[in-house]
Amino acid sequence: MQALAAHGMGPKWLAWVDKKGRPVWPIVIQMMFGLLAFINEAATGSTVFTWLLSLTGLSSFFVSGGL
């Protein structure tokens, strides 16, 4: 993600790195996806996954309707 942003093929805020050269925002995004994977392992993980899937479908419906 950081390399794409650095070459102008992604959002500019993803290209930001800290003083030690770590791409902070891509790391945060990857950690959020990792947390989603752990939610699926919980006892109510399938319910949470269904809610997230429904929200994604609903938002894509509204975006396509707004075009």
Image: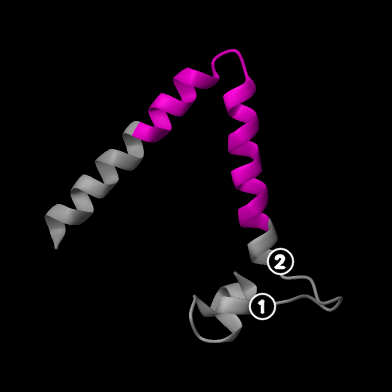
Report which residue position mark 1 lands on.
16
Q: Give coordinates of residue 53: x percent, y percent.
A: 38, 34
User: Could you tell me which quadrant the N terminus lies in?
Assistant: bottom right
Q: Which residue is at a point 13% across and 53% down the rendered structure image?
A: 65
Q: Which residue is at a point 81% across and 77% down the rendered structure image?
A: 21
Left or right for 27, reference 10: right
User: Could you tell me which quadrant the C terminus lies in?
Assistant: bottom left
- The answer to whether 56 is drawn above or below residue 30 in the figure is above
Picture quadrant where residue 44 is located: top right
Q: Give coordinates of residue 52: x percent, y percent.
A: 42, 33
Instruction: Confirm whether the magenta stretch covers residue 45.
Output: yes
- From the image, give the main secondary structure of the stretch colored magenta: helix
Instruction: Confirm whether the magenta stretch covers residue 57.
Output: no
Q: Which label number is shown at residue 24?
A: 2
Q: Secondary structure at mark 1?
A: loop
Mark 2 or mark 1, which is nearer the start of the sequence? 1
Left or right for 17, reference 44: right
User: Badge 1, how many Cα within 10 Å: few under 14, some, many 20+?
Assistant: some
Picture quadrant where residue 57 is located: top left
Q: Which residue is at a point 61% across and 34% down the rendered structure image?
A: 37
> As shown in the figure, which amino acid type bears the numbered disc 2?
Val
- Start-end of magenta stretch: 28-53
Q: Which residue is at a point 66% across and 56% down the rendered structure image?
A: 28
